[in-house]
Image (tube, rainbow, N blue to C red):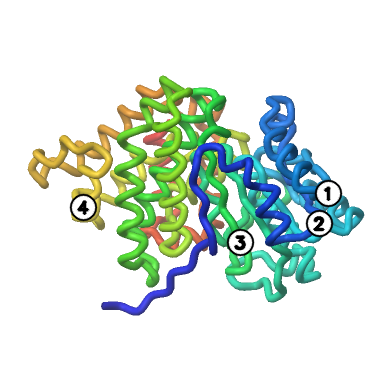
Amino acid sequence: MTAFTFNTTKSVICEPGAIKKLGAIVKEQIGKRVLIVTDPGLIKAGLLTSATDSLDQAGVEYQVFDGVVADPPVAVVEAALAEARAASIDGVIGFGGGSSMDIAKLIALLMGGGEKLDDIYGVGMAKGQRLPLIQIPTTAGTGSEVTPISIITVGEAEKKGVVAPQLLPDVALLDAELTLGLPASVTAATGVDSMVHAIESYTSASANNNPVSRTLAREALRLLGANIETAVKDGRNVQARSNMLLGAMLAGQAFANSPVAAVHALAYPIGGIFHVPHGLSNALVLPHVMRFNASACADAYATLAPDAFPDLASVPEAQRVDEFINRLEALSADIGLEQTLREVGIGETDLPVMAADAMKQTRLLVNNPREVSEADALAIYRAAY
C-alpha cells in the first residue's frame, strides 16, 4: 500500500438541534470572548439567534462580524480582522456557508500567528498557530468545516487559496435544523458541489489519494445521490437535510486529503469573473470535464456510478461511464440548475479569457487525472456554452 497522510477536524458533532450546545462547547474549549463570522442574509433570516441564545445562556461574550459576501475579497478579511483585534477575542466561530467559514479560518490563523495574508497564500506557507476555531455550516456543500483550505478573491477576479493544516477547525458542529430554510436553488447548487468534491477526490491524481478518502468519497456519493432531490423538493425534510449535511462533510474530509482538480479549476473563473455561485459554477462544467477525463479514469467513474445512482450497477461497464455522466447532467437539470454558460450571462468572447485564467489554478490542475492545456480548457468551456 502506498504511504499517505490523512488529517481532519478534531471533533465532529452531528445532531439536529446541536446548536443548543454551542455555548457550553465555547466555554469549555475557547474561553469568554469570541468573534462570530457570518453574512447579512443569515442575520436577516434569524438563523444566528439560536447560536447567540446559547452563547448568552453560557455567559460567553461575542462580537458578530456579518460583512461576508460571496467570493469574499481581501477587504472582507481586513475588516473582520480589525473587529477581531478590537474585541480581544479568545477564538472564532464560522457560521454560514463556505465563504463565512473560509474567512473565519483566516481570522483565527492571522490572529493566532501574527502573519500577513500576503505571506501565506499557497500550500504550507503559513507557519503560525491559530486561535481556537469552531465551524457551523448552514449549507450542505463546501465541506469547509473539515478542510484546511480557505479561498478568497484577490484583485478583481483571481481566486487564491491558503492551504495549511492549522486551518482545520477544532470542532465541526452539524445541525440539520439550520439548513431547513435553505432555498431550493441553494440546496441544489451546494449539493452538486458536494458531489463534485467526492468525484474529484476519488479520481484525484494526487500522490496522497488514499483508501480513507476513497471510502469517504463513496459514502458521500451514496448519501448525496439518495437525498439531493428530496432535499431540493421537500426542504423541511430533516432526515434528507441531515443526510445531505453528513454527505457534504464526508466529501469535504475526502478532498481535504485527496484534492480536487479540473472541475474546480475551470469553475473558479466562472465565479471569480462573473460572480456565479461556486456550486453552480461546478455544475456547469462537471459533465464536460468528466467527458474529457473519461479516457484516463473510466474504471473509477464506473465504480462511482452505482454509488450515486444504484440502478447503474446493472448497466454494463462499457456503457456505465457515459450513463453516469448523462445522469449527473440530467440530475442538475431536474433540480433546477442552469445548464449552459450563456444562461448565467457569459458571452462566447469571454471563453478564451476564462481558459487563460483557469490555467493559473496549477494547485488544482496538477491533481487532474488527465493533463489539461489551455486549448483543452477552452474546448470544455465551449462544450458548456
Sequence-earlier tag: 2 or 3 = 2
Residue picked out by circle 4: 298
Which quarter of the figure has residue 182? top right
Sequence-earlier tag: 2 or 4 = 2
Residue picked out by circle 3: 170
In-front residue for pair 239/83 = 239
Question: Residue 156 in the image: x percent, y percent?
Answer: 72, 44
Task: Determine which of the numbered discs, if any, sits on residue 61 in the image.
Answer: 1
| Closer to the eye: label 2 or 3 | 2
Q: Amino acid at mark 4?
A: Ala
Q: CA distance from mark 1 to mark 4?
A: 53 Å
Q: Amino acid at mark 1?
A: Glu
Q: CA distance from mark 2 to mark 3?
A: 17 Å
Contact check, label 3 and label 4, Cβ < 8 Å: no
| Residue 153 in view (yes/no) | no
Residue name at image x 49 percent, y 43 percent:
15
**Secondary structure of the residue carrying numbered label 4:** helix
Q: CA distance from mark 3 to mark 4?
A: 37 Å
Residue picked out by circle 2: 32
Q: Amino acid at mark 3?
A: Asp
Circle 3 Cα neighbour tier, 10 Å, few/some/many (<14 / 14–19 / ≥20):
many
Q: Amino acid at mark 2?
A: Lys
Residue name at image x 67 percent, y 58 percent:
133
Contact check, label 1 and label 2, Cβ < 8 Å: yes
